Amino acid sequence: MEFAYSLLTIINEMSPYILLGFLIAGFLHVFVKPSTMSRHLSGSGIKPVVKAALFGIPLPLCSCGVLPTAVSLRRQGASKAASTSFLIATPQTGVDSIAATYSLLGLPFALIRPVAALVGAVAGGMAVGRFDKDTETETNSPTPACNSSDNDKKPLSSRIGEAVRYGLVDMVASVGKWLVIGLVVAALITVFVPDSLFLSLSEHPLLAMLAVVAVAVPMYVCATGSIPIAMSLMLKGLSPGIAFVLLMAGPAANFASIMILNRSHGKRATAIYVGSVIATAIAFGLLIDLVLPAKWFALPSGGIAGESCHHSFGIFDTACSILLAALLAYAALRGHTHKHKSETQNTDMTRTYKIDGMACQHCKANVEKSLRALEGVESVEIDLSAGTATVTGTASPEKVAEAINLAGFECPL
């Protein structure tokens, strides 16, 4: 009973901000064109690196979903330094996670989080520009963005509807699983983990931060899903700086993204990427604990989940929580129906392809768009959970595999 109440309390605090963030994310997706971004990210020096970080900070993409976007930017003329900066900044933040950070952890956390992402992204991008320069000249030659002007021809009402659909349907499907995991883990920590477990770690902040990094790297959690976990750790006695390390390192430096990045950008760029994420997270964590006033990072209302017995549910917050739960349920049902449809589809013109590295709704959208543009393809069904694409049509397997590779993923035949 205490676990359920703690979970509902956390959800009620976060849901209005999460929904607002999803809506803003949808409008960014529809009204900000990749061609506009790539035009500003070409060339050398610090300017495109800073622009890439600023572009990436508000975008609500996870660490795997940002990889095909960065590959697309590279093909449209962005430098390796700028694309690395984009890769570092984007998964650590997003309008949805910034809003949710404010709701649970307060304004200072919400302000420092994008600043840390900007510093780490610029440092990492400049390091790549200095020590791992572009070696493939063709990647620096801008190519036309596929269907870049199609969206501009749609009426405003249609584009607004598409933005709402993307934010409240596609985005929920993309991060919903990891958000639920984060909420459940947070409630479990709050209720079942004794406070004394973290007291010894708090006496050695640097050691604790390294331990958090060691846990965060193999753990896959999105920027929003990491927030309730960080809050629960603070309620159990860990310092704000240690919790901040989890907020920054968890979403960006996990094994899945590291493996894909190693294949797409090389070992040196990958090492710089991981080093920038970890070093920046620890540096800002130490800054929070040792320099900034502790009262800035006191949890709102003295600890939301920790005082759930005194918490009352407001009508608006409850309505937002119900809406968020309904959207999550719809996303899960939609995914199950989609999977069943893919399994039952079997004709002479249909073939299923295994795709390596596809892990979120944004990955799925990139693959689907690339395959639908291929001559001879009649229909495409993507099973995100299985990592497969079922393609119907006359296109050869080699052409299909090439289209998947162009989207930024690997398709072994």
Image (spheres, grey):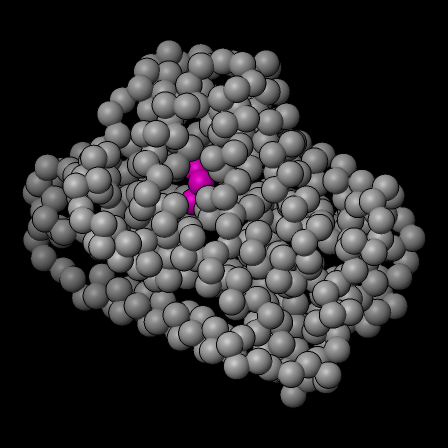
Q: Is residue 84 left or right of residue 231?
A: left
Q: Is residue 48 above or below residue 276?
A: above
Identify the residue shown where x is 32% and y is 29%.
35
Looking at the picture, how far across and down is residue 16, in whole percent? 51, 67
- The image quarter in which residue 286 lies: top right
Is the N terminus in the top left, top right, bottom left or bottom right quadrant? bottom right
Query: Can see residue 265?
Result: no
- The image quarter in which residue 277 lies: top right
Q: Is residue 214 above or below residue 183?
A: above
Q: In the rendered structure, which segment of residues is drawn in magenta?
A: 63-67
SS assignment for the magenta stretch, majority: loop
Identify the residue shown where x is 29% and y is 44%.
367
Q: Is residue 322 left or right of residue 128?
A: left
Looking at the picture, how far across and down is residue 42, in whole percent? 42, 19
- The image quarter in which residue 13 lies: bottom right
Inspect the magenta stretch and tell me whether residue 64 lies in it.
yes
Q: Say which of 191 and 35 sits in front.
A: 35
Q: Is residue 181 above or below residue 357?
A: below
Inspect the magenta stretch and tell me whether residue 380 lies in it.
no
Looking at the picture, how far across and down is residue 273, in whole percent? 59, 31
Identify the residue shown where x is 59% and y is 63%.
182
